[in-house]
Amino acid sequence: MLFTHFNFAKDPAVVFFKGRYFLYYSAKIPEDKRLRIGIATSPDGENWTYETLLPLDHACEGEQNGHGAPAAIVKDGKVHLFYQTYGNWKTDAICHAVSPDGLYFEKDPTNPVFRPSSDWCSGRAIDADVCIFKDKLFLYFATRDSEMKIQKLGVACAPADSGWHREDFTQCVADTILEPTLDWEGECIEAPAAMVYEGKVYMFYAGAYNCWPQQIGIATSEDGVHFTRMFDKPLLGPGSEKAWNACESGHPYIFDDPATGKVFLYYQGSPDKGKTWYLSRREVSFSHGYPVVAPGMAVEWNGTDDERYAALPRPIDTAPVPDKENRIWRAAWMIAAVPMTTERQFAEVAEAGFNMIILSRPEGEEMLANYCTWMEKYGLKALWYDSKLRVGSYTGEMDDYVFSPVTWGHMLCDEPACAKFPELADMYRDYTAKAPGKVAFINLFPIYANMQQLGNKDYQEHLTQFFDTVHPDYLSVDVYPMDRDGIGGYYFDNLDQFASACRNHDIPFAVYIQSVSFHHVKRLPSGADMRWQAWCVLSFGATNIEYFTYRTPDSHAEVFLPALIDRDNSKTSRWYAAREINRELAAMEDAFLAYRNLGAFTHKGEEAGQFAQFAGQYRDFTVLEEICCDTPLLIGAFAEKDGDGYAFTAVNLTDPGKEVLPVAAGFRLAKGCTAVLWQKGVESALTTDENGYVNVTLDCGEGAFIEVRCKK
């Protein structure tokens, strides 16, 4: 995106309203020397069409000289615009207007609705932004000291359910909430841009006056008033010498897009010391609570990807990402793909919510060191494929990287026949003795392997012989159910037999899910397909979900359609879908891992098809007395590890490929029980209806996790 209007577009604000995007910005037109507010619309947030200007009639005090720097928010079916008067120096203030269509506004009769007291500043207020947080509308603004030299930020509040008139606003604190202290901020912090994320206010802000250069920083607050910087360097700086933003990347606006679920940073830039101004945007993701700004237009950076990512700011006085072992592992499989070579590629893995990579040891010690450095930087663990540490070629020698903090383990063998079990057992014991704390990883055949592949008469005998011979501490299986003509048969039977064996031996396990199309029968999974598989394997007790594959395999043996990353190193729709799934899992992992799996069973499973049939259905989950749902469900039963609570998963068993309407499911719990729902990464309390049920609506491909507490 690159937008301008008569070569002047600054101070962006964006909303999604009534099916399209609205851009409000500071504008100048040839026939009017005053600063104005322009309005443009877009079908996609990327391509904009100029519509009109906010009129200067019915102006509030000072507005007749101009207005600009808008902020926008949608509430109760209307767009609320907060903007500043312009050209009045110390007496500029914040005004308010409301529109039912996003284009034509009625101005607030109490304008200006806010200016600060002059006991701690000049009394000026410009550059407004607003967000709703803890039942209040927080109005952030820029002001100056009494000498009109230092620009700094302040905040006012109004009840969220008020009309947001002058009488509704009060100054939260008679002091600055953020002022310039870092070298790159110069004498100015302005243009606050706030969003609420995971219970905090994230404030993007502009540091330094225009074209010093102005750059973008970020701070956070638990209460909306007291802010702490996340970085001591800019989050986003100017572009290269000939770029559209060579002189600054400034005046941010952060937009949490309700239509796409993505977050975008809109900002202004100038290539010529402020003679012309443009607007652009970049996508923002969050990794371990820290924002990561995606690459922008190609002309913004002339260096390499590694140089750009090396230049990203790091957290202030913050240790590396904690090595949290008690987690739901979200692993990106990329063996057999073209090897990764840049830091950017590792950053993208973390941006997509993965915390583990399954990858081959790279060639060369320098690249191996880079891999370890980049994975540690982005909080990633490595499950390595190393030909020296494989059954059949293992010598017992181990290189130093085996003991690196990023090494989670090594893949000793993939899909061994029973004839390899004795050799594998010897190697397993030697590896675990020499590399304590690392995982000796073995992946078993799925249930549809034939007798020649297994070396056993059936799958159950294969599992029994493996456990009796190898005695593993960790195990994996790959089973890919998403066929072109539906869900493959025996999926749940495979999960049940494998999970039951692991449960009986008290070991954690991983399950691969299908995120790519291969052979002629496996379909290209949708986001719903991947989410459905993830919830199914969680229901059987998996704590490690391995995406096969993350990068598209470079194979001539069979045809692979694009995975999460295609062969041109571009993100596909599956990358964005996986990011949402992984965020959902990460949000609930502490709650989920507080329980141990007891088994799984189905509701109306016989109606779902062959894939949902399995013999070992758990039938002793008395906390759940009755299920009311017209559609088949998978239920995973759980008991609290260190307590007397229970939990269960509920998965919509409709084939996600059919894209049917959501289903309503009611669950009658044992008397005196209450429930907490985890759905789409959000925790909420469930209330009981008049029939004694707690009710959940599940989209096609969706699952939910429900914690149950019962009175003793």
Image (spheres, grey):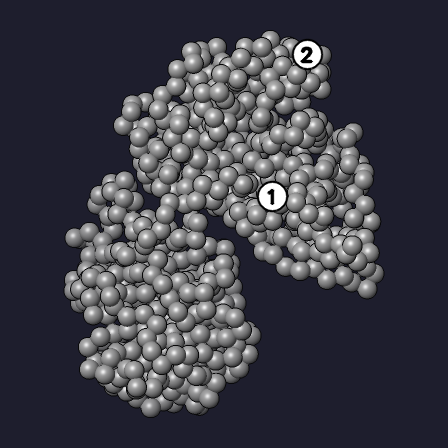
Q: Secondary structure at mark 2?
A: loop
Separation of residues labelled 2 and 1 (CA atoms) = 34 Å
Residue 552: name its quadrant. top left
Where does the image place residue 507, in percent across and percent down from the top left? 62, 29
Residue located at (37% from left, 66% from top): 227
Where does the image place residue 229, in percent across and percent down from the top left? 33, 61
- Residue 173 seen in render: yes
Label 1 crowd (10 A; few <14 / some 14-19 / many >=20)? some
**Which sits in the foreground, 641 or 196?**
641
Q: Secondary structure at mark 1?
A: loop
Instruction: Inspect the image, locate mark 1, and give the three-letter code of the amino acid beneath it.
Output: Leu
Q: Is residue 147 left or right of residue 563?
A: left
Q: On the image, numbered disc 2 is attached to which residue?
A: 456
* Pair 2/1: label in front: 1
**Which sits in the foreground, 662 or 491?**
491
Q: Is residue 378 left or right of residue 712?
A: left
Residue located at (76% from left, 61% from top): 688
Residue located at (59% from left, 22% from top): 472
Vertical placement of 376 versus 116: above or below?
Answer: above
Q: Quadrant of the C terminus?
A: bottom right
Residue 620: name its quadrant. top right
Residue located at (70% from left, 43% from top): 639
Q: On the image, numbered disc 1 is attached to which residue?
A: 593
Where does the image place residue 341, in percent across and percent down from the top left? 32, 32
Label 2 crowd (10 A; few <14 / some 14-19 / many >=20)? some
Instruction: Inspect the image, locate mark 2, and give the three-letter code of the amino acid beneath it.
Output: Asn
Q: Is residue 612 left or right of residue 481?
A: right
